[in-house]
Image (cartoon, rainbow, N blue to C red):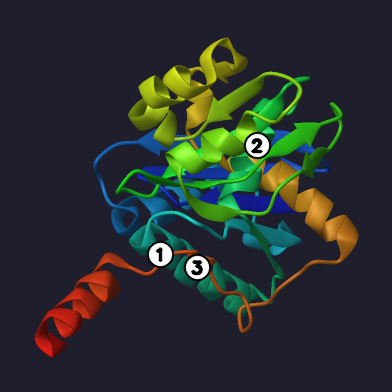
Amino acid sequence: MKVLALDTASKVSTVAIIEDNKLIGEFTVNSSKTHSKMLMPIIDEVLKYTETELDEIDYIAVSSGPGSFTGLRIGAATVKGIAHGKNIPIIGVPTLDGLAHNVIYTDMYICPIIDAKRNEVFAAIYKSNKEKINMISEHELINIDELMFKLEELDSDIIFVGDAVEVQQDRIKELLGEKAIFGMHTVNMQKASSIGLAAFEYIDQGIVNNYINFEPIYLKKSQAEIEREDNERKKSN
């Protein structure tokens, strides 16, 4: 079984091909170039260098969010186009699930955090049994201090991964002390290989979409929606 996996939920463009839980090839670019310019060329390169044809792909796995609104929409549009043209099922893997799979071999609790601005993060809590990631709490948009209060109750150390680590590390240390462990930069980045590996768990459970019913998960209103509501509120006052 071959899975084409991609993640565009952050500024990182990453594409991988997984065959039967084995990584065949992965291409990751962390730059200022937009996904609209980078994604299709990266997909083409991964297919070329792994000598894979699109007709050989059984599933397309994509980070379904939360994350960058623009990035998620580009990812969704891309997989929908490929899935429609080749009649390939889509596996939507939450971004936080993918980040948790970056550090699957740990005894600690895993807490992926994605920066949502205004001192908020997208977060969830996971625990690994070295073979499978188990979700302890639901995905949520939460103030960083409120998240730390929840994590204080856990009975072991917590490893944090995700782009919000760089932004919130000092505050996390202040509130959790030595209980907080931080992943290296490489595990704080989204990886298509982690999205692909997580996808196999969804496939086993029969959680599969198609190009018609797949939609990203945002968990938060876009900045344009927030600004429009603020303007409407000011006008009404």
Mark 1: few, some, or many residues within 10 Å (few <14, many ≥20)?
A: some
Mark 1 and mark 2: Cα distance apart in space: 23 Å
Bin the neighbour count of mark 3 within 10 Å (Cα to Cα): few under 14, some 14-19, many 20 and up.
many
Against 180, residue 76 (above or below) is: below
Q: Amino acid at mark 3?
A: Ala
Whether residue 185 is situated above or below residue 55 in the rendered picture: above
Q: Is residue 231 above or below residue 45?
A: below
The residue pinned by badge 1 equals 74
Dot 1 and dot 3 residues touching (CB under 8 Å): yes
Per the image, the residue denoted by label 2 is 100
- Mark 1 or mark 2: whose residue is earlier in sequence: 1
Which of the two labelled residues, at mark 2 and mark 3, occupies the earlier sequence position?
Answer: 3
Along the line of sight, which residue is nearer the eye, 41 or 69? Answer: 69
Single out the mark in the foreground, 1 or 2: 2
Image point (57%, 16%), residue name: 181
- Residue type marked 1: Ile
Instruction: Give the image location of residue 14, x and y in percent.
Output: 48, 43
Disc 2 packing (10 Å; few <14; some 14–19; many ≥20) = many
Q: Amino acid at mark 2?
A: Ala
Structural distance between the alpha carbons of marks 2 and 3 = 21 Å
Residue 110 appears left or right of 190 = right
Residue matched to label 3: 76
Judged from the image, the secondary structure of the residue bearing numbered disc 1 is: helix
Which one is nearer the viewer's eye here, 211 or 108? Answer: 108
